[in-house]
Amino acid sequence: MVFNPCMKHKLVRRTVRDFAEAELGPIAHEIDREARFPWEVIEKMRPLNFFGLQVPRKYGGADIDSISYAITIEEISRVSGAVGLCITVHNSVGIYPILRFGTDEQKQLYLPKLARGEYIGAFCLTEANAGSDASGVETHAVIDGDDYIINGTKIFVTNGGVCSLPLIFVITDPDASSKNASVFIVESSMPGYSVGEIEDLCGMRANPVSSLFLEDCRVPKENLLGRPGDGTKIGLCALDTGRIGIGAQAVGIAQAAFESSVKYSKERQQFKKPISSFQTIQNMLADMATEIDAARLLVYRVCALKDAGKPFSKEAAMAKLYCSGAASRITSQAVQIHGGYGYSKEYDVERYFRDAKVTEIYEGTSEIQRMVISRTVLTEPM
Amino acid sequence: MLKMIVCMKQVPMVTELPWDTRTGTLKRELAEGMMNPACKHALEAALRLKHEHDGHITAITMGPPMAEEILHEAIAMGADRCLMLCDKKMAGADTLVTSYTLARAIEIFCPDFDLILCGCYTSDSETAQVGPQLAEELDIPVIAYAEDCTVNEETITIKRVSDNFLETLQMNMPGLITLTTQNFAPRYTPIAGLQDAFDEPNILTVSADDLGLDEEIIGLAGSPTKILEVYSPTAQKNNIVMKGAPKRIVEELLERFDDRIGSVIRKDLKVVS
Amino acid sequence: MAETKRSIWVFGDYRNYFQNRVTLQLLSRAKDLAQRIDARVCAVVFGHEVDEWVGEYIAHGAQTVYVTDHPMLKNYSTDIYVTLMERLAQTYDPEIILVGATSFGREFAPRVSKRLKTGLTADCVDLDINEDGILVQTAPAFGGNLLTRIVTPQRRPQMATVRAGVFQEIPHNYEATGEIIYVEMPMHLPKDRVRLISSERQPPREQKIEDASVVVCGGRGMGSKKKFRNLYELAKTLGGEVGATRPVVYSKWAEEDALVGQADKHIKPKVLFSFGISGAIQHTAGIVDADFIIAVNKNPNAAMMKMADVAIVADANQVCTALIRELKKRIRT
């Protein structure tokens, strides 16, 4: 296993960082304030393979290793958590299920456009009654000739306002004793599909999170991903992969907060000394640095397992749990170090703080991650 | 086919650098490196010419092992193959010897070139000497500080601004041009390119022995210029230090120096109560 | 002929004579250096109908001027001039050759040094002679926070390029006399491989910032492009010009022509405001001649703060905006 700082990963990091700082850096603050999705930067990201990071070459993707993928998400998120979120959701839960479970026709039809960023992807699971408890899903699909008719509402869909190819998690037989879940590839152009209002959220504000309404939405049978009843399997697999990206995202946000804290503590003088000379601050910075490094390594470990074709659910849950918690702690600490300035919207620190929090919630709350880990720990042989 | 060579250098990314006062050379391995900006522009110019004229690009650099990173970057952006001139004996070379070493490598490994492109100067030493000296060593015509270039069969036409003269110049190839950062804004490197650059690198590493070069004529030993010392230029003035709230500072500043500043801007800065 | 004495040569770069005085400045410095090693100061001029410049160089310190005057040399040609200089140097064996670091000089000097197989130091900020009688060339080292002293111990001539503004010219001396040596155009000169298709003199750039008595310079410490704009407002209020450091120009917070520094413009304002600039020598070399420097930086240990007459430890943008307000109050009254 090779990982940072091998030359390839260093170069990936620098390449993405250069792009992110040049293109997103100047507008990151503004797009958060205005809750604006930066189409003009998305446009520039398309030809650079940001939308097809791990898609195979024959479908027009970059097919990079998972650590390079994690580094890419980390570096984008370091500048703009919201855009990093868009990219990771698109690449992981939006594309990976099609790669793993799609038919050749489905891959041929959809992957090239997804890889080019012509279609932006998403994964819709959450509903009003189904958050951590996926069995609460009520959106259902009923066979009608050569099609399925889907009815239901999905909420808190990341990329909801801009996605054109969301994967929708539905149940196909609500009356059966064990509910059968399935996943459909739905195109936003299909009749009966509409997008709700963009949510007004605490953080990740430049990401257009919204509800999706499916009202008698007619979807061809060919758009069923995998077999009927595969929904749970696909969902779990998608979330496992998604956790790599969320972990990387959290690391990126924490890194930005940390860098800002180091710089500020060297410049800010109180009691005639820079505050970096005080042990309290030094201890905070030491802990932050160690946590970020530990978090990053946890993410890379999952990447290595995934690329080696080994199971990685427990490790992915651990990474997501730890990274998101670290990001919340570190960004809170960063605000503290910056004092009043940290609390001001004129600086970026409070944005990192707001952005970090949701990493503990979406794609499986920290409580769910603990459930996954403890279940494995209690059943695995020691 | 237009055969091009792009000479590039890895320069440190940070502005403050660890300096080895013993040898008077840079402790380069301690800093993150990047492709010198002007060299990147030169590569971009070559990439555009490659596209227009069905060309081939060989990227060359002379440096320590970590400099290989910029060659991978060059491939990721579209260069076809690379030469890495790496040997402890080459270290500490001044521009004269650098151009000599590059020339020998070119003569052995890519002798039938049409055009060599170099950045006009590096962000670390800024001497702007290697390009012209390399041309001299290879005995080919050179035009420095090119801002625009057009290739036509055997000739290349350059536009540049030199000392307030807008010049259009032409030379026959093989030749060498150095590019400024005015034009040819470098493209972003696609991620797929980075993957390729490490899957199929096509980088040949070359030592001093491969070039048949004697230790005495290259590197620090062969350089006619020698560094006597490196020192920090800070001249400490007896200055007035002001701290506090900006508003108060400004008031105090204008209180004390209203005459000094006022006389220069020819305005009365005294407060009229 | 005074060839028993050593000589220090200065290349006569006359084509922008009135804007660019570097040749005259180098002649002045050459005079100081020559005294130290008992050498003659010589100017070298290639061109056509150049008597005016020859006279100027004598009036500004040249004791001998080598001139090659020929119609072929009407326009500068790097190729031909390099060959002429090479032959001249091989014939007369100068101890030192100094070239102004104009665009031309920076292409010409390296090629000459290569031909003569000798060392060259670019963009020197100082030239001196040490106790061994060798030319000590002081040039900025990487990043500009360090200076290096460089020598060419063995090879001759010792060569250096120097930017305009580093040295001061000697005032024009109408009484000065000098020897003019006409050097014949060589019979078999290799053909010029670079053909000049067209050459248009650009209107001389307005030297607003070089002539300004008040300059407001800004660096990355200003924080953002938007905040940097405040400097323009301050400059306007003071009737001055805005200068910028290289990182700021790269980030496109300011235009290229605002760039102040060693490689770019040397300014000599009576009052210089420096906002959020750390003070890398690439920048500070361009401001050494400022009379009164007020620097603002959050970091009290920045090099720029040590150079300043008044060092204000505070946020650059906040002080800038406070200063604008206060000035407007006072100027109105």
Image (cartoon, rainbow, N blue to C red):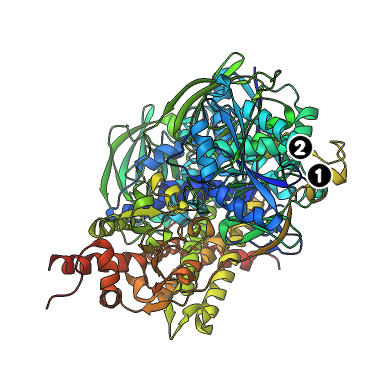
Return the mark for residue B100.
2
Horizontal and vertical percent for residue A98?
A: 51, 38
Say left or right for B125 vs A83.
Answer: right
Question: Callout 1: few (<14), some (14-19), or many (20+) C-alpha neighbours within 10 Å?
Answer: many
Question: Dots 1 and 2: beta carbons under 8 Å?
Answer: yes
Q: Earlier in the sequence, mark 1 or mark 2?
A: 2
Return the mark for residue B202.
none
In this rendering, the answer to whether B85 lies above or below A322 is above
Label 2, secondary structure: give it: helix
Amino acid under disc 2: Tyr
Q: Which chain carries label 2?
A: B
In this rendering, the answer to whether A210 lies above or below C222 is above
Name the residue rendered at 71%, 18% in the picture.
Answer: C188
Return the mark for residue B218.
1
Horizontal and vertical percent for residue A199?
A: 28, 54
Say left or right for B116 vs A178.
Answer: right
Amino acid under disc 1: Ile
Q: Depth check: B219 or B3 in front? A: B219
